[in-house]
Amino acid sequence: MWHEERTYRRWIESDLSTFEVRVGESDLLISAERPLPDLAERALRLARLELESYLARDAELEKTLRPREPLPGAPPIVLDMAEAARACGVGPMAAVAGAVAQVVGEALLSESEQVIVENGGDIFLRTTRPRVAAIYAGKSLLSGKLALKVSRLNQPLGLCTSSGTVGHSLSFGQADAAIVLAESAALADAAATALGNRVKEPTDIQRALEFLKQIPQVFGGAVVIGQSLGAWGEVEFVGL
């Protein structure tokens, strides 16, 4: 599979040990209190195996753009994706990158109190001190100029981004970045897709954020489109 160069990773600075894990098209950047590449790779391979085995008997789940109930015996990663999709009104695959990051991150928590797993702009994290995540928004003049400060400590979180102008993820909107902070990475991923789908021009930002407010277990969100920026909830920006 072809890998897009993830130039935004050059912005990452961390007091933690940082390493990459790649399996198939999955390309994770991981930070933890010590290097744990073998554990991370095992967790990633298992997650991919369970997901691919399930999709072999339920191909519709991979294609649909609507919520879909999983078949009996679906693995936990598929159940998490389906639950997130129901909450946000999107297809389960809208949550797949976040769900993979979450599975790997949860596995690493057995060996590290702090874990950050980034999967194509979708992040699972648990941290004991505030963290800052730079906002990559393609050609927007705000890209690389702002960062989002994560202040919720000592609990797993999801911080995910969808874009209609950057990367290969499917979006029906034109947001340069639709960013969501939520209780899980699967939910944040699905919600970021739903948020981005609703933004085709700057005047859509407020309406899209009003939709986001209605999703349980979502803490906040932000939208960047061109030079316009809107935010709601637990979103604190800092300059870079």
Image (spheres, grey):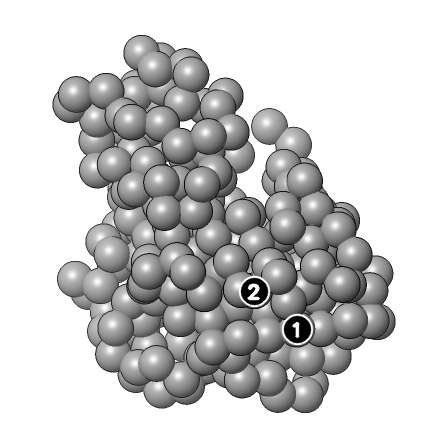
> Height in image: 215 above or below 147?
above
Say which residue label 2 marks.
209
What type is the residue that disc 2 sits on? Leu
As helix, strand or loop, the secondary structure at mark 1 comes to strand
Judge left or right: residue 225 versus residue 218. Answer: right
> Height in image: 78 above or below 190?
above
Judge left or right: residue 225 versus residue 94. Answer: right
Judge left or right: residue 50 versus residue 185. Answer: left
Residue 38 in sight here:
no
Quadrant location, the C terminus: bottom right
Question: Where residue 221 sits: x, y (%)?
Answer: 52, 68
Question: Where residue 234 sits: x, y (%)?
Answer: 45, 79
Say which residue label 1 marks.
230
**Disc 1: CA contacts within 10 A as few (<14), some (14-19) or many (>=20):** some
Which residue is pictured at 66% across the width and 73% down the height? 230
> Height in image: 134 above or below 120?
below
Could you say which is closer to the camera, residue 50 or residue 223?
223
